[in-house]
Amino acid sequence: MTGLLDGVRVVETATLLPGAAAGMALADLGADVVKVEPPHGDLIRILGQIAPGHSPAHLQLNRNKRGVTVDLRDDADRARWEALVAEADVLIDGNAVGQLARLGYDGDSLHRLNPRLIRCTLTGFGTAGPYADVPAHGLLVGALVGSFPGARKLEGAALDGRGGGPALAAAWPTAASICAALYRREKSGKGAVIDVSEADALLAASMVPVVYFANESRIADGSTLPALTDGQHGPRYCIYDVADGAKIAFAALEPSLWARFCAAVGREDLLDAGYEGDRLAAEVAAVFAERTSDQWLNMAATQRISIGPVHESIAEVLEDRQLSERPVVAPMSHPFAGEFVAIGPPFSVDSQEFEIRRHAPALGEHNGELSDGWS
């Protein structure tokens, strides 16, 4: 289990997915994250419940955290909140723009309470601009940056805005900016104010196709590597049917990968065939139809060819022989919800196994433990 952020204290006050995902990223890195919820609980808890108050989204995004309830209109709860913030390193504010200020905790108040605090706001559109005060869900955020194809093909973000895409696209950039602020504070003692926009994050996560579209008129030579604005392009970067009825992904844009493929299948006559053309597409499709998926995957590993499986269900993904050996598939057991398949972090540190050290908390589970602040 990575302990890169051991000793870092994070207060996460947010609803639904964005703040929870950012807090999970820091918690998975070892930070002590306290999730602050209203007394009635975060709506994330009831998005399809496995057990009362424990949805898959809650179990996934609030693991490795402690949880308390706070009503900032109650004096006793305000005291608990202030004690937590006063000794925290980081505050993740995933509320509507200005909500904490309206409850008496604007930037100046938080600075007086904790001058070293790294305060990160995480909202749909950011804290400034014409849309800043609009309550934002993923639908609005994804639509803004063109990630919802409709009747026409949109030239926008390649990542889908559904299924929490904007929130999850923002999680690791949020964690990275907070870690950078922690590093600066170690040298200067100065806190930071970080403003993260989910829309910005979703667009940034799709930056390569976006910059090709935005600068299309400036491209003077398009005869070299094709621009993959549609996710796949041409016979050398495509998905093919194989002999056992499965599908295989094939990517050989680089001349060296294409040469290895042509040699492995005995088709050196295709070496100079270029990137496009109906004849080339038909020739390559016929070659792939000659072998099963296992044969192709074995050839990929032994001949170092860019070929991989195409999964069409979550069950296939979770059972894949590569993914199942990585920390990204993380089965766990929860005291209330039982056995649960979680998604772990997309990295490992020092070859350590990923560990879920705390289950996602029940509502107010740590109110007593954190009644007077950190313990």
Image: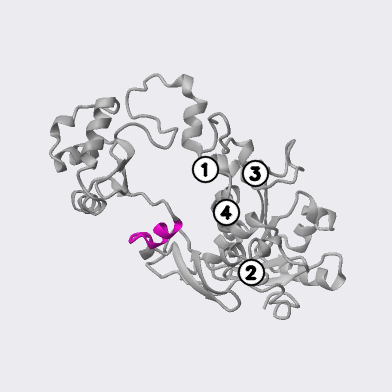
Q: For the residue marked with disc 4, what is the amino acid?
A: Ala
Residues marked 4 and 1 touching at CB (< 8 Å): no
Camera-near label (2 vs 1) is 2
Residue assigned mark 1: 159
Residue assigned mark 4: 171
Q: Secondary structure at mark 2?
A: loop
The reply, left or right, for residue 170 in relation to residue 307 is right
* Residue 365 percent across, percent down from the top left: 69, 76
The residue at the point 20 percent across, 43 percent down is 290
Q: Tag 4: Cα neighbours inside 10 Å, few (<14), some, or many (≥20)?
A: many
Q: CA distance from mark 2 to mark 3?
A: 24 Å
Q: Tag 3: Cα neighbours inside 10 Å, few (<14), some, or many (≥20)?
A: some
Q: Which of pointers 3 and 4 lies earlier in the amino acid sequence? A: 3
Q: Tag 1: Cα neighbours inside 10 Å, few (<14), some, or many (≥20)?
A: some
Q: Secondary structure at mark 1?
A: loop
Q: CA distance from mark 1 to mark 3?
A: 13 Å
In the rendered image, the quadrant that contains the C terminus is bottom right
The residue at the point 22 percent across, 37 percent down is 286
Residue assigned mark 3: 139
Q: Which of pointers 2 and 1 lies earlier in the amino acid sequence? A: 2
Main secondary structure type of the part rendered in magenta: helix
Residue assigned mark 2: 54
Q: Which of pointers 4 and 2 lies earlier in the amino acid sequence? A: 2
Camera-near label (4 vs 1) is 1
Q: Which of pointers 2 and 3 lies earlier in the amino acid sequence? A: 2
The reply, left or right, for residue 289 in relation to residue 339 is left
